[in-house]
Image (cartoon, helix red, strand yellow):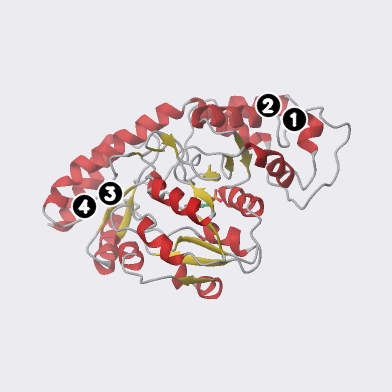
Amino acid sequence: MIKFNIPPCTGKENEYIAQAIASHKICGDGEFTKKCNEWIESHTRTSKALLTTSCTHATEMAALLCDIQPGDEVIMPSYTFVSTANAFVLNGATVVFVDIRPDTLNIDENLIEEAVTPKTKAIVPVHYAGVSCEMDKIMEIARQHNLKVIEDAAQGVMSEYKGRPLGTIGNFGCFSFHETKNYSMGEGGCLLIRDKEMIEKAEIIREKGTNRSKFFRGQVDKYTWVSAGSSYLPSELNAAYLFAQLEQAQTIFDDRMKSWTLYYELLSPLKEAGKISLPVVPDNCKHNAHMFYIKATDLKERTALIEYLRRQDIYSVFHYIPLHSAPAGKQYARFCGQDIYTTKESERLLRLPMYYGLKSEDVYFVCEKIIQFYQ
Ligand SMILES: Cc1ncc(COP(=O)(O)O)c(C=O)c1O
């Protein structure tokens, strides 16, 4: 059987978790959390990285830090995970969807400006499959209209746009370390903060609305409730698991890239024959091989292909159902302009098995079966 995903494990996870247990510090913000934060800060060159319990929670923190209020509008693609929208809906905002580009499946940067109204507060680009959105254009629109930019880089750890790590370009960036991601802690995430003046406020929101982080640094002699907040910091046990992988980040990256490149090579003849589409990575983007997808002709063909592969014990999956077609999407959001590509492309897309440690022979087998299907 070829599974769709196997969570990454590089070897030192058990040892580090045992160290955390032996240190009698298993709640949040111990040594492993600090190490993870520092690793992310040094590898992304961002002002501050704060490990969180999920990317969902990192995005909720960003919404609070942007002071999203009832009636505000937030622009994003409909082709994304529910958390991208929920973080803002929880604060009473209306989500405004714009269509995606058919090549990268990212928000179409040329349609964003049309969606801006006097109520718009933020833009949330989602870097699908770890391939960057067109950030120069998005940042320019944000500058002109005085909007915040929150990058949903759930899938974009170790990816770059024009040499800049994803998650560090907008005001805030949100990473996911869920078990389906390149680097994992089971459930977890990280908030990247670009502007130094937001760091203290973020630390307070993450620590239940208290200044406990300042207290631990010895900057205040007791900690107290200073604002609204919640509990967004993960346990040391999860951070210990993650740190083992961050230490091996390049090894994981190279291994996934090897599988991605092999898929691309083996499936190129089908693309040349016009049977399927393959992922597009613009020249100015360095991606992280988070996902390998193909696009079939339509929903019917994709459904048949999933079924065909399943019969060979190969597990492939489709991805997001566009949010504007969901019940909550109808309640909390509107679509600006026409849905030309969002639904159509989402119905064609099929994700192939991809994980750290995927064997080349398995990639060959999957591709052979896809080629057979099209014969
Ligand atoms: C684009 C996007 N944003 C946010 C999330 C939520 O991540 P998490 O599970 O870490 O909360 C996901 C999850 O897959 C995602 O794909």
Q: At 35% across and 70% down in the image, what residue appears?
A: 339
Q: Looking at the picture, how far across and down is residue 365, in whole percent?
A: 23, 44
The secondary structure type at the circle numbered 1 is loop
Q: Establish whether ligand 1 lies closer than 8 Å to the Cβ of label 3.
A: no
Counting other residues with Cα less than 10 Å from the Cα at mark 4, is it few (<14), some (14-19), or many (20 or more)? some
Q: Looking at the picture, how far across and down is residue 283, in whole percent?
A: 28, 40
Labels 3, 2: front one:
3
Q: CA distance from mark 1 to mark 3?
A: 44 Å
Counting other residues with Cα less than 10 Å from the Cα at mark 3, is it few (<14), some (14-19), or many (20 or more)? some
Mark 2 highlights which residue? 31
Mark number, residue 279 = 3
Of the residues under marks 2 and 1, which one precedes in the sequence? 1
Q: Establish whether ligand 1 lies closer than 8 Å to the Cβ of label 2.
A: no
Of the residues under marks 4 and 1, which one precedes in the sequence? 1
Mark 1 highlights which residue? 25
CB under 8 Å between callouts 3 and 2?
no
Q: Looking at the picture, how far across and down is residue 92, in whole percent?
A: 64, 67
CB under 8 Å between callouts 4 and 1?
no
Q: Amino acid at mark 4?
A: Ile
CB under 8 Å between callouts 3 and 4?
no
Q: At 65% across and 27% down in the image, what residue appears?
A: 18
